[in-house]
Amino acid sequence: MQVSNEQASYVCRSCKIRKRKCNKALPTCSSCAKKNIPCEYIQPEPSGSSISASASDPWWLGSREHNQPGIHSIDFPTLAFLDPGFLRHGQVEFERAASPVPAHIMHLLGDMDEMHDTAARFFKHIHRWMPFISKKRFYELHLQPAFSTQPSVVLLLLSLKLITTILPARSGPRSALYHAVKYFYLEVEGSSGISILVPQAGILIALYELGHGIYPAAFLSIGACARYAHALGVGVNRTVYTTKVLTLVEAEERRRLWWAIVILDRFVSIGCPGRPFATADPQLDDLLPADDSAWDQGIVRPDEFFALSSPLAGHMSKFALLCQAARLLGQVLHDVSSESTTDDGVWMQLDRTLQSMLAAALNLDSPDHDQIAFVYSALVALHTTRLPSERAITQDTDRTRCARAVIQQITDRISANLVERQCFAGRDPEDMSPWGLFFAYRVCVSHTHCPQETASSQEVVRSIKEAFLAINTRWNVAGVYLQLLEAQEVVTRF
């Protein structure tokens, strides 16, 4: 084959891909001629642009034309699952093309002033008891005009709006905003690469569903959050390849993301033990969240970390104490759903640990009422399954006596605090978590089935019902519990 003396001004595609020296001969370079393969000279993209490929490109180079038939492309998440070791070579660039956000979604989100108002409400009310989003990073990175139109950022902002919206009277929680957020979540989840913003939005959606009694959606949403977090490399074996974390604040945000999922994953099953968790049980060497106030300012001190095995301490962050309570709740749900009831040592140890945690929480100068309510719910979940119903044959076992004592203890404490209204009744519903609704409902059910109901217990039940009516303006599941109480009262009369 005769080769022309003319030369191309750049190497051919084949030599470039195989990283071989190209003599740039026209019409075919010597390397391609020797291998008897097509030789193509295509002008490269301008400097700084991402790799783009046509149908003749190798499949792993990717393409801008994601939707064109016959064009094979691969993105970072796919490669991270199929061959994560390839990413360690660091020689492949990926285009991060994002679809434009639909106009109706941007309309729901509102202008920048509305976004700022939504964020302020979230960090004032929800963030106080579920601090899993970095306040500093949120304002610096996401709540900016240049980024507020990116799909993953819009999804998070829209989820903040959903969780902070107080539903109008007589309107159900399955609102147009709720459905819009759910559908947009599915779209962003599958098309915008992998980002911590997606599971953060998913947690807010799941919390909305849990707080408003939207089932089984709440249970399924939490499972989806756990799976996405695992894909992100959060809460999985350290050998799993994931995106690089460059700062301690980022690492702390990922840790808090995982703990938030663990908390919801346990609490969503508190009334129906036996369903498997979507997340593994925390290990004793797992680190707890760092100081809440410092983290809000973008400060994380590695010398102040506590492991889950650390003894309870008043100087731990409130979120860290809630995480410890969530781990205990997981053990409670394992115990009450176990078919074996012969070993009383497990529940006795759980009771002692929860009682110690409750005492420590109540003795603080500024008790965290949401954490206290969570511990109460865990205690009630541990014991009420062993309480016989009114029509059942009463068996006076150690566990039954302990369960009655716990219910009476909580009843007395509620009765004593009716004036101060510190833990449950009388608080601003917008500031409240949904953790206390379960234990309040179970206390009422226990007294409803008790044939020796006293005037004091009747007053407690009446006060809890009034609290449910007030809280229903924030969390619709309170109204659902009220309906269940009415049904329980009907059942006990006949």
Image (tube, rainbow, N blue to C red):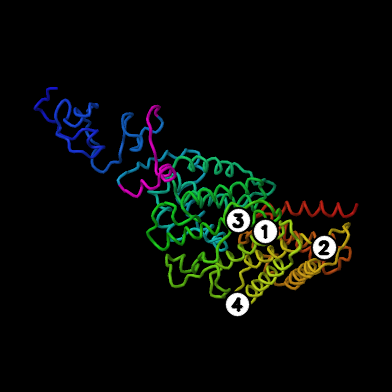
Q: Position of residue 38 (x, y in %)?
A: 24, 26
The N terminus - image quarter: top left
Q: Crowding near pointer 3: few (<14 within 10 Å), some, many (20+)? A: many
Q: Is residue 23 left or right of residue 453?
A: left
The residue that mark 3 highlights is 264
Q: Is residue 378 left or right of residue 389?
A: left
SS at mark 4? loop
Please give the residue where the numbered disc 2 appears in the rendered image.
Answer: 447
Give, as a three-letter code, the residue at label 4.
Asp
**Which of labels 3 and 1 is toward the front?**
1
The label number, if any, that marks residue 365 in the structure image: 4
Q: Is residue 397 above or below residue 40?
A: below
The amino acid pointed to by label 3 is Leu
Tag 2: residue type?
Answer: His
> Which residues are drawn in magenta?
68-90
| Residue sitting at x 54%, y 51% | 226
Q: Residues within 10 Å of mark 2 (few under 14, many from 20)?
A: some
**Residue sitting nearer the eye, 262 or 410:** 262
Residue 477's place in the image compared with 92, above or below, is below
Mark 1 and mark 2: span between their CA atoms? 26 Å
Q: Are marks 4 and 1 in contact (CB under 8 Å)?
A: no
Nearer mark to the viewer, of 4 and 2? 2
Q: Residues within 10 Å of mark 1 (few under 14, many from 20)?
A: some
Along the polypeptide, which appears first: circle 1 or circle 2?
A: 1
